[in-house]
Amino acid sequence: LYAMGDRPDDMDMLAEQPVPIAVIAGVEDRIVDLESSRGMRDALPDGHYFELAAGHMPMMEAPVETADAIRAALGLLG
């Protein structure tokens, strides 16, 4: 945890990624606030952003909604 807290901010590298990126944020997350998640969204030139009714672990707290977000990001939903 200390190493994660002490690492430098790499937000600028998001725009340089050659692959699509999806950010799935939990609106009740007490570790990564929505402002930070929305900052990631804003840094993505062609990304996908989802806010789910969940905390820090949406894949466990809202698995169906997380799967739907992933499918939407992959273009599998209408």
Image (cartoon, rainbow, N blue to C red):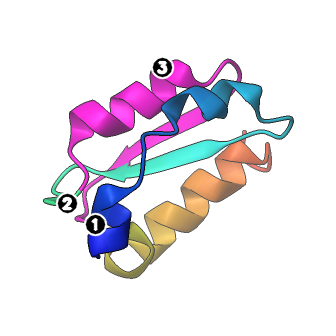
Magenta span of residues: 32-57
Taking the spot 28% from the left edge, 66% from the top edge, the residue there is: 56
Tell whether position 45 is magenta.
yes
Q: Secondary structure at mark 2?
A: loop
How far apart marks 3 and 2 lie (CA) works out to 19 Å
* Numbered label attached to residue 29: none
How far apart marks 3 and 1 lie (CA) works out to 20 Å
Q: Is residue 66 left or right of residue 76?
A: left
Residue 48, percent across and down? 60, 35
Mark 2 and mark 1 lie on one chain; the one further toward the N terminus is 2
Residue occupying the far bottom of the picture: 60
Tell whether position 23 is magenta.
no
Q: Are marks 2 and 1 in contact (CB under 8 Å)?
A: yes
Residue 69, percent across and down? 56, 52
* Numbered label attached to residue 42: 3
Residue 22, percent across and down? 61, 45
Instruction: Name the residue type under label 2.
Output: Ile
* Numbered label attached to residue 56: 1
Instruction: Name the residue type under label 1.
Output: His
Residue 36, percent across and down? 30, 36
Q: Which residue is mark 2?
A: 31
Observer-nearest residue: 21 or 77?
21
Taking the spot 64% from the left edge, 33% from the top edge, the residue there is: 13
Residue 7 occupies which quadrant of the picture?
bottom left
Residue occupying the far right of the picture: 18
Residue 57 in sight here: no
Mark 3 and mark 1 lie on one chain; the one further toward the N terminus is 3
Query: Could you classify mark 3 by the number of other residues whose Cα lies within 10 Å: few (under 14), some (14-19), or many (20 or more)?
Result: some
Relative to 46, is 58 above or below? below
Q: Secondary structure at mark 1?
A: loop
